[in-house]
Image (tube, grey):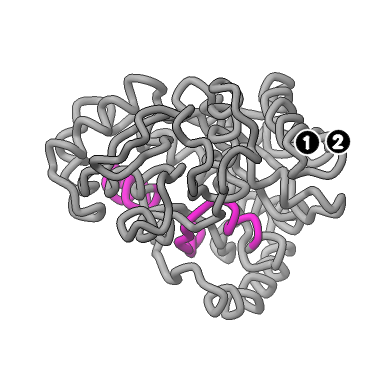
Amino acid sequence: MSRHTLRASAAALALLLPFAAACGTSAKAESASDLSSVTLNVGATGWKNEEAILKFAHLDDTPYKVEWSLFQGGDQQLQAIRAGALDVASSSEIPPIFAAADGKPNFEVVAVQRAATLNQEVVVPKGSEVTDIADLKGKKVGYVQNTTAHYFLYELLKQARLKWSDIDAKPLLPNDGLAALNGGGIDALASYGTSITTAHQQGAVTVGSGKDILSGNFLWSARDTVLESPAQRAATADLIARISRAYAYVRAGRQSEFAKVIAKTTHQPVAQAEKDLRDAQAQQPTQARTVGDDTIASQQKVADAFTELGTLKSHLDVKSFWSRKLNTDLKKAL
């Protein structure tokens, strides 16, 4: 049975290191048909939505073990992979770019999960004098560094004919950014997910959105040791496919029921949780797909924007850390 064990923090990463290394070593001896001794350490962002939806859809009875670890952002998941503390990470297109920027990544992007680009916004407190992105000039703007928030904020500024240097940009984790917004430490916040949901519950107003800027490609990255093991590869492909099937199960007339699960975890009204769920699945049904030239090109466009911004010091060829090694297994699992 899948189970959630750890919350992300420096201490948690330290605790995970020896365990993750041991699991990666023991699984190598297993064949792809024997998954009973495989344990996958898998990251989740915001809340335990993947674990929760698998349980809801009765698809959590995996023939391998899954240890879920919760993080505030995909950037932290990629840091954990680099540290050897995670086997599989889920993120937007951005975190793998920075995790691979030193040219020596210990992971590869192995699959894509298409998902909605809603709740990716720049928000300001209720009553703010800021009413659009152009008004951010000279303002303190919090953002989640090396994530979708970083990217869509940059693109929104360009659309408003502003440069990054025109704002006082403050890198903050989602929860810290929300606290700073409410406490007056920043004038605006670029963030995503539950932090944006909570911000709206507290009266925040949207002044910019990444909805039409982001591709909707969310990436599954696997540590090299996973890809070296037929059993771990098979387990990873199976898990990604199960998550796709779980979302299809919810879309088949069970949105209202699953919204109750979401609301309990995110502490929002059930009606709002259901609306957000329906809107997201209507915009882009959550489903996995294999690696293709188009998915690699999409991330290259994002990497080039960060090179233009100066956050990346030189051109990064993203195809160097993409792999089709999981395509065959994932096609079968899907």
Look at the picture and state if 173 lies above or below 57: below
Q: Residues within 10 Å of mark 2 (few under 14, many from 20)?
A: some
Q: Residues within 10 Å of mark 1 (few under 14, many from 20)?
A: some
How far across and down, in percent of the image, does residue 45 sit? 46, 52
Task: Please tell me which residue is depicted at 57% across the width and 80% down the height of the picture.
Answer: 15
Q: Is residue 301 magenta?
A: no
Q: Do the CB atoms of the residues marked 2 and 1 lie less than 8 Å apart?
A: yes
Quick check: 113 left or right of 233?
Answer: left
CA–CA distance in space, label 2 to label 1: 6 Å
Q: Which residue is mark 2?
A: 315
Secondary structure found at label 1: helix
As rendered, which of 35 and 279 lies closer to the eye? 279
- Residue 68 visible to the viewer: no
Quick check: 126 left or right of 130?
Answer: left
Look at the picture and state if 5 lies above or below 189: below
Amino acid type, residue under disc 1 in the picture: Thr
> Quick one: label 2 or label 1, which is nearer the N terminus?
1
How far across and down, in percent of the image, does residue 141 sit? 49, 46
Q: Disc number at residue 307?
A: 1
Amino acid type, residue under disc 2 in the picture: His
Q: Which residue range is magenta in the image?
A: 50-79
Quick check: 59 left or right of 102?
Answer: left
Secondary structure found at label 2: loop
- Residue 76 visible to the viewer: yes
As rendered, which of 159 and 146 lies closer to the eye? 159
How far across and down, in percent of the image, does residue 233 sit? 66, 48
Residue 126: image quadrant is top left
